[in-house]
């Protein structure tokens, strides 16, 4: 079944089946970090944080936070 990633509560990325079933609001737990935006491809979920990027595998494993650090300016502009 096709799944959709979504922004969850503060500090998490959730996922849900495309038909609205099997909601997992804390699929990827980011602690106190709140993602500003997310994107998904065939292998990973990516997110933008205030000062960097993160990525994880589609099954929720292999989470890397702040893979790329930016300067003091937010990547959203």
Image (cartoon, rainbow, N blue to C red):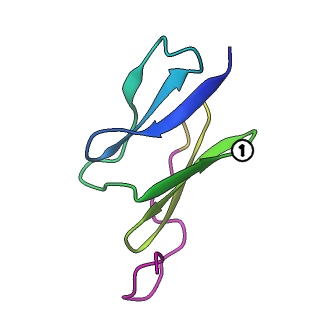
Residue 60 appearing in the image: no
Splitting the image into 4 quarters, where does residue 44 fall?
Answer: top right
Instruction: Name the side, left or right, on which 22 lies relative to 39.
Output: left
Q: Position of residue 32 (x, y in %)?
A: 23, 53
Of the pair 29 and 36, the residue shown nearer to us: 36
Residue stretch rendered in magenta on the structure: 63-77
Of the pair 18 and 14, the residue shown nearer to us: 18
Whether residue 23 is situated above or below residue 32 in the rendered picture: above
The residue under the point 72% across, 40% down is 43
Splitting the image into 4 quarters, where does residue 51 fall?
Answer: bottom left
Quadrant housing the N terminus: top right
Residue picked out by circle 1: 41
The residue under the point 37% across, 70% down is 50
Instruction: Name the side, left or right, on which 76 lies relative to 8.
Output: right
Q: Is residue 73 highlighted in magenta?
A: yes
Residue 10 appearing in the image: yes
Q: Position of residue 45 (x, y in %)?
A: 59, 45
Crowding near the residue tagged with mark 1, few <14, some 14–19, many ≥20 C-alpha atoms within 10 Å: few
Splitting the image into 4 quarters, where does residue 24 fall?
Answer: top left
The residue under the point 50% across, 16% down is 20
Whether residue 70 is situated above or below residue 9 in the rendered picture: below
Whether residue 66 is situated above or below residue 7 in the rendered picture: below
Q: Secondary structure under badge 1? A: loop
């Amino acid at each position: 079944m096709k799944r959709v990633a979504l922004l969850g509560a503060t500090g998490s990325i959730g996922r849900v089946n495309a038909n609205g079933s099997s909601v997992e609001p804390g699929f990827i737990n980011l602690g106190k970090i709140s993602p500003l935006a997310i994107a998904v491809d065939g292998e990973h979920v990516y997110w933008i944080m205030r000062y960097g990027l993160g990525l994880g595998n589609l099954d929720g494993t292999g989470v890397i936070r702040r893979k790329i650090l930016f300067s003091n300016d937010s990547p959203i502009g």
